[in-house]
Every structure is written in structure tokens, then in C-alpha cells.
């Protein structure tokens, strides 16, 4: 029965169709083979809809949120994870190597996990137990982040809000700004900025011809402009999401470029949401924080994370720095409203994760994190060398754990599918990051060394 | 300089004025004494506003979110925490006992913290390391929750979404439903339902005369109706938040009452967001889950938490169960859109906390959690006996760790202030939970036994 198919699909497999299938149709997610649907499949799909409006099953009278209905595709990374699973069903014996979703693979340094284990055990003692922490995070950790990353930059303990990761704070920031702001994003960009804006109701519908949502300003970043937007052509928006070193292009903006960006925001009265989650990967003298730019505290806030420094992707810990100088048009501080959102929609990051964060910022922890970052940077070099030796134009890699490889004239999803099919290596199709990513593939440097070397071998075989 | 006062106020002290000061004015939050402002203070405050519009400081052109501006007061619990701090400044030698914010105090059972410590250490090994987990949570934990709490009720592993706590999922659920739904809440109720609805833009302004937001249906629950609303007088809303055992009244709805509620939702095509975070405290045969009521899966979802069972208020772990049968008016499953929000706005609960959750649901863990709950229930009896012996009308307590004490004709905030001033015991003013809580004070049973006994002694002294 068609309707039972719909109901029995587990939620985590029921993501909407990806942009590969943007022209419509039903996708059988548990099929062992990806396929484009025939016309008859589409008709079957319509039968389900008809059946449900005929009330063979009970439906509430609550309308679906029109903003969520606007979302064009499943969130990119679960979609890739789903395709990887489908591939593994098809080739159960294949050694699949994931250089896709940017997931860390190396163990967390012992100095950090020991601190978390100690904190866990303490929670079983009368002296060591604690319940609700401050929603804004542990005072010591806030202080340590302020002094470690913003020591000379005038960012204080009380400006730091501890989070369970940058992605979570992006949505909380969207709650602060609400539906009536207009956002700009780099194109290509990390999809959570756009998707969370769509969910908040900031955008128009997805326009299939240009692969963009209405009312978002997409600031094209490509090799021609050195991956920094031509700000003279960008109209004013309220909010500018800016990620540097950039995910996915791996490009870090220079001091001169960021100075331009801050001046642009100041001229327009815009707020920059600066994502510095990869700052520790910077090798050259590009700024590690937007607050290195004079005047930035009046127009910018910064989100960051321990995920890619200490392997905390699963432990969940990050932060947002909001200077007291950052004010809404009515003169009220942005930090005050963010604080209200944090108190209403969040209850603080796990106290055990926060103990880990504090250990990360000890002198031993900082050294250990540096080693982790250094290891992934060596991986990055191997990947850059691989694609360069094959004659591809390769970007990123120097200041970020991402390598951005150009396949001119080809569809990103086709390249993704070819690489997966022929080498069992998972990458990320560039167009998943926005229309400006079309023709590129992002290769992540997170992986065990032997897997990186093996992937390199297979890629050389494929593209030789 | 007046404007520097505004800028130097740390965000976590800058919550808006509470309803105690609802008639306006500036509150000096770090003063050692609470006071109502004189007219001249208000004028100072206006000077700040004038000065900022005269651009002595830079302001962006980004307007403040009008929905956040609607919020009448600081989120209740940080506000109480702030008042407690002010009291401790005033009486630095007082032994302040908090029976206020419902924060757990007893150590987490060793079987649970040992599992978390083990998981922490594993993260330092190649075999035990893991990065991003599924956004929906660990499959084993989802399965264990489904079988432990919903074994006979038709809720499956894939219906369970692991969260970092019920409060966080309330806001994520609000993102699912969006701005264009109307909500109903019990009155009094846990403030996060209302506040998150205000932030989403579902409501009108706060109406000071009735102490309610426009466009929210407040379902009065008081001793006269046995703390269950008279549904014959309640108009249809899209969403019905329903917490049972209730925070703050401590009352658990009976099977008959919940059957009425489910029928009411079905007749209206409404969705019940059922909060069962205190279900393990139930002593009688009241349902532990809304899904015990036949037909509930078509009209309800359920949020819950390990916070009050295992002392996880700081560890952060909860879940939401969304049956596949729960459908929007267009026949699409609610779980599908919640999954999309979880994937976009969340990255899963901490893997260490999730290991703790799995240990909670082992046979040893379940027994240990039962002991923790039993301990707090003994505290509850002491508090009930204390107020009963003093001649107060006392509600709740039997099925919940909250005791709801009636002070007829008095302001809740006045009673709160008197108890704090004269006994150094922190309670929670009932009116902080809605206008229906006026004249009541909530006393939480979370505390060390000696503190509960000491508080009892002091209260007997005060009210003898």
C-alpha cells in the first residue's frame, strides 16, 4: 500500500530530494541503486497525496510551516551520509573512505579526555556534583577562551557565550535577528547559514533556474576574485555571514580584505556573523579573528568551535563572542538579546564537555590541539599534491582542512557520484554549498593517514 | 557617563525588568539592595537613550527583533538566580538554601558516571574515537528509550530523537511549527513554552492588565478544577502544551482527564506537545506517557529528559518522541520536519552524555535512578508536611518534586521576597509561571536532606 511506505519511512531517511533530483520525483531511499524516477513513479507519489487528503488516515488541522516547505533539499551532510550508506549497501565489501562531511577521525588528546573523565567521576561525589550551570557557560571557560583567543583584542569573559557547537549557535542567532532581516552569504558557503534563514522566514522561495532562494544575497567567491566577493557590487543587507578560513573553498581572507569587509559593514550599518571555526588551520598571516580588524567590534560577532581543533565533533562544544559595542539600530546591545535566547532556548553545554574545553586551553592542551591540527594539515598537503599532480586546478588547503578542486564544465554531483562509484571515496559536491560551487568538489583532509594515502592512490588511478 | 553604565553591564546581568517592576523603571542589578526607582532614575535612563540616538556611539542599522522586544521579563529562572545573588551580597554570611529553580543536588549514581568516564577515555583511542554522531542520536540509546519508556505503546526507535534537554527541544519544536500557529498553555505553566512562542512571533504584545500575551490561550488550572482545565471553555488552538506531572503545580493528570484531552485535540485537529519530564515521580496510577491514551499517537508528541531522574541538569540529555502517525493537515509527518530542524539547527547531544543515558537505562542504572527519585520524593513529603502543619493549603508533591503552596490574597513575589529575606530560603513565585500562579509559591524538593530539614525549621519559625 502506497501510504504505508510513506509512514514506515524512518525520519532520518526521509530527507527531501537533493538538488540532483531538483526536477522532481520520488526517490526510493532504501533502494540499493540510485535512480532517476520515471513518470509512473511520480504518479504513484501523487496517489499517496490523494489518499491522505481523502482521510484514509487521520490528519491534524495544523498546517505545515510554509518556511520549512520552502527548503529545497535535505540538509547537505545527512544527504551525503545517506548516499554513502546506499553505496555501502550496493558494495558491501568495498573499503569506503570518507573525505566528505568533514568529520574528524583522530583520537582526542589524553590530557583532554582525562579531564572529562575526571569531571564525570566528580559528578558522583557530593563535593564535585553540580546541576544546572550558567546558560552562558562556565565562567572559567569563558575567561580562558577570552584570554586565549582574544587576549589583545578587547573581548572579555562576559562577551563569550559557550555553546554546544557553532551550528547550534547559528540557529540561535537567527532567532535573535528574526524573520525581517535580509542576509548575505558567500557563494559557495556552509549550508546552515542559508537553511536556518529559510526556516526563520527571511527568504523567498527557492528559484530553480538560479539555484538560489529569493531575498538572500549570494556573494560569489571564485578563483577569478580570489574567493573574496567584489563588495562594490553587493547591495546592503542587515546580516553578512562570513566564514574564514572558508568552508568549503578553504580560502582565508587577508587582513586587507577583512578591513574592506568591516568598512563595508560599517558603511551599511550591517552586522557580520563571522565564523572562525577553522582559524587554527591558518598558516600565513591572515587574521585568526575578525576582531583583529580595527572597528570590527561595532559591526561583528564571531562564532567558533572546538570541533576541528580537538576532535570535539561528537563531544559538542563551541562559543560565540559578542562585543558589548555591537548595537542594534535602537542602541540596545545584541549581546543582551542573544543572552535572552540562550536563557530561553538552551541550558548550557554539557558540564563534562566544558571541563574538556578548559583542558583544551591549558598549555598542554593547546600544544596537543596544535598537534591534531598539524596532523590534518599534513593530510591536506597530500590531497593538494594528489590533485595538483593530476593537473587539476586546486584551491584552499593552505589555511584550512579543505581542498577545493575544479572540474570545469562538469556537474559537482556527477563528479561526486563518479568518484564514489569508481574509487569508493566520499567527497562533497561543490554545488551543495550554493550555485557558486558548481563544477567543484570539496575534499576534506580529516582522515587516518593510511586512508588519505589510499584515497590518493585510488584517485590517481581514476584520473591518471 | 550614563552610556558607559549600559555598555559595561555584563549580558548575564542585563535581563529585562521582572514583572515585579512591570510598571517600568531602571533596576540597578548590582546594587546590594533591591529598590523601586524614583522618577529621577527614569530620567537618567532616558538620557542614555537620547545619547545613543545622537550617535555618541556607533549603532548598526539592524533593527531589533520586535518579537524579542515583546518579552515582558527576564526568563524566570535566571531572574531568580540573580535575586539570590543580590541577597547573598546583602547577607554574605547567610546560609542560603535554594528550593527555587528546581536544580538537582544529589550526586549522579556511579554506574552512570563510570560509563561517561569510560566513554571519555575511549575517545582517546583509535578504536573508541567517534566524531559526528547521528543528529537524531545514538541508535542504541534511541532503542533503549523506546523499549524502556514506550515498550507496549507502539513507539519505536526511529520515533525517538535524542536532545540536549527538553528546554532545547521546545525551541526546536517551535521552529517546526513556525509563527503562524496559535498555542494553548496550562496556566500556570513552565515559562519556556510561552517565551519560545513569543520569540517565534506567534503572539501579540504582553497585556499588563491581565498579565498575558495576546493570541495565547491560557488554560486556567487551579484547586477549583483539580488543576485540569475546563476544556468546554477552551477554544481550538493548533498546539496545546501540556505538562504532566505539572511544573509548577505538581499535579498529574489522571487517565480520564488525559483521555478527555486527547479527544479534545482530535475533535479540533490540534497537536499536543506533552512534557513528561517528571513522569518517574508519579506515585499513583496516572499515566506516565500520553501514549498510554488510545489514539494519542495521532495528535501528540512527547518531550522528556534525564535531568530530574539522574541528576543530568548539567550533563544535558533528553528526548522527544514523535509518532509516525502524527501528521500535518497536508498529510506530511511532523517527524519529518522535526528531523529537518534537528539536522539544520543541532548536531546531536554530546556522545559522552549519550553514553551516560545508555547506562541510565541498564537494569542497574534504572534502579539507581529510582533511588534518586525516591530520595527527592522523601524530601517532598517533608516539605508537604511542613506547610500542612502550618495550616497552608498545599498541592502537588504526591506525583512530582514540586509543592504548590497557597498564600491567598498575597502577591507571589512578595511572599517570595519575605521568605528569602527572613529565612534565606529561595522559592519560586507562582506568578512567574503565569497569572494563574498568583498567590502561590512553588517549593522545589531538590536539595540535600539537611537543607530541606533546615529550611523546614526556618519556615516553621517564620509562619508559626
Image (cartoon, coloured by chain):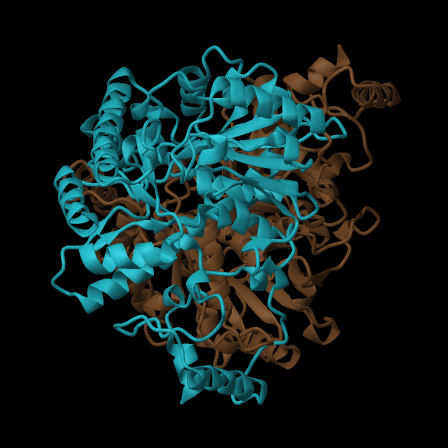
Chain colours: A brown, B cyan
Count numbered badges in the picture: 0
Res A460 visible = no
Residue occupying image coordinates x 21% and y 63% = B88
Q: Nearer the viewer, residue A275 or B96?
A: B96
Seen in the image, is B404 located left or right of residue B65? left
Image x and y of residue A153, in percent: 38, 76
Seen in the image, is A1 located left or right of residue A222? right
Residue occupying image coordinates x 55% and y 38% = B342
Q: Nearer the viewer, residue B132 or A53?
A: A53
Seen in the image, is A100 located left or right of residue B430? right
Residue occupying image coordinates x 64% and y 81% = A267
Res A121 visible = yes
Image x and y of residue B82, in percent: 32, 61
For residue B92, which quarter of the picture? bottom left
Above or below: residue A432 compared with residue A232: above
Residue occupying image coordinates x 45% and y 67% = A322
Q: Nearer the viewer, residue B449 or B52?
A: B449
Image x and y of residue A79, in percent: 62, 34
Amino acid at each position: 500500500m502506497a501510504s504505508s511506505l510513506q509512514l514506515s519511512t524512518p525520519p532520518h531517511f526521509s530527507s527531501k530530494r537533493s538538488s540532483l533530483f531538483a526536477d522532481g520525483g520520488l526517490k526510493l531511499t532504501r533502494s540499493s541503486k540510485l535512480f532517476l524516477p520515471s513518470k509512473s513513479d511520480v504518479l504513484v507519489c501523487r496517489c499517496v497525496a490523494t489518499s491522505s487528503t481523502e482521510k484514509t488516515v487521520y490528519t491534524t488541522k495544523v498546517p505545515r510551516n510554509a518556511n520549512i516547505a520552502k527548503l529545497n533539499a535535505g540538509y547537505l551532510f545527512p544527504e551525503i551520509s545517506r548516499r554513502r550508506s546506499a553505496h555501502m549497501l550496493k558494495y558491501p565489501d568495498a573499503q569506503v573512505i570518507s573525505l566528505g562531511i568533514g568529520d574528524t577521525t583522530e583520537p582526542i588528546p589524553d590530557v583532554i579526555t582525562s579531564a572529562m573523565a575526571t569531571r564525570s567521576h566528580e559528578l558522583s561525589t557530593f563535593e564535585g556534583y553540580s546541576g544546572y550551570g550558567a546558560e552562558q557557560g562556565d565562567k572559567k571557560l569563558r575567561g580562558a577562551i577570552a584570554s586565549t583567543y582574544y587576549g589583545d583584542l578587547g573581548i572579555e569573559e562576559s562577551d563569550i557565550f559557550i555553546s554546544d557547537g557553532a551550528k547550534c549557535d547559528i540557529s540561535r542567532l537567527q532567532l535573535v535577528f528574526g524573520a525581517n532581516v535580509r542576509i548575505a552569504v558567500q557563494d559557495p558557503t556552509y549550508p546552515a547559514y542559508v537553511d536556518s534563514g529559510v526556516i526563520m522566514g527571511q527568504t523567498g522561495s527557492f528559484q530553480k533556474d538560479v539555484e538560489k532562494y529569493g531575498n538572500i544575497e549570494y556573494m560569489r567567491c571564485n578563483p577569478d576574485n580570489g574567493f573574496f566577493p567584489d563588495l562594490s557590487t553587493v547591495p546592503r543587507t542587515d546580516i553578512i555571514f562570513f566564514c574564514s578560513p572558508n568552508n568549503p573553498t578553504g580560502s582565508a581572507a587577508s587582513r586587507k580584505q577583512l578591513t574592506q569587509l568591516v568598512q563595508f559593514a560599517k558603511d551599511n550599518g550591517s552586522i557580520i556573523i563571522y565564523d572562525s571555526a577553522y582559524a587554527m588551520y591558518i598558516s600565513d598571516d591572515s587574521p585568526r579573528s575578525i576582531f583583529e580588524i580595527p572597528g570590527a567590534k561595532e559591526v561583528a560577532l564571531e562564532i567558533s568551535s572546538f570541533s576541528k581543533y580537538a576532535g570535539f565533533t561528537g563531544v559538542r562544544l563551541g562559543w560565540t563572542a559578542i562585543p558589548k559595542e555591537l548595537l542594534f539600530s535602537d542602541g540596545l546591545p545584541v549581546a543582551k538579546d542573544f543572552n535572552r535566547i540562550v536563557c530561553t532556548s538552551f541550558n548550557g553545554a554539557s558540564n563534562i564537555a566544558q571541563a574538556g574545553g578548559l583542558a583544551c586551553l591549558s598549555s598542554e592542551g593547546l600544544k596537543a590541539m596544535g598537534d591534531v591540527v598539524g596532523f590534518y594539515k599534513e593530510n591536506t598537503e597530500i590531497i593538494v599534491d594528489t590533485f595538483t599532480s593530476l593537473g587539476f586546478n586546486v584551491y584552499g588547503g593552505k589555511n584550512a582542512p579543505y581542498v577545493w578542486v575544479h572540474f570545469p564544465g562538469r556537474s559537482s554531483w556527477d563528479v561526486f557520484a563518479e568518484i564514489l562509484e569508481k574509487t569508493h571515496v566520499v567527497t562533497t559536491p561543490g554545488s551543495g554549498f550554493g550555485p557558486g560551487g558548481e563544477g567543484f568538489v570539496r575534499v576534506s583532509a580529516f582522515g587516518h593517514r593510511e586512508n588519505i594515502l589510499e584515497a590518493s592512490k585510488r584517485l590517481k588511478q581514476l584520473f591518471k
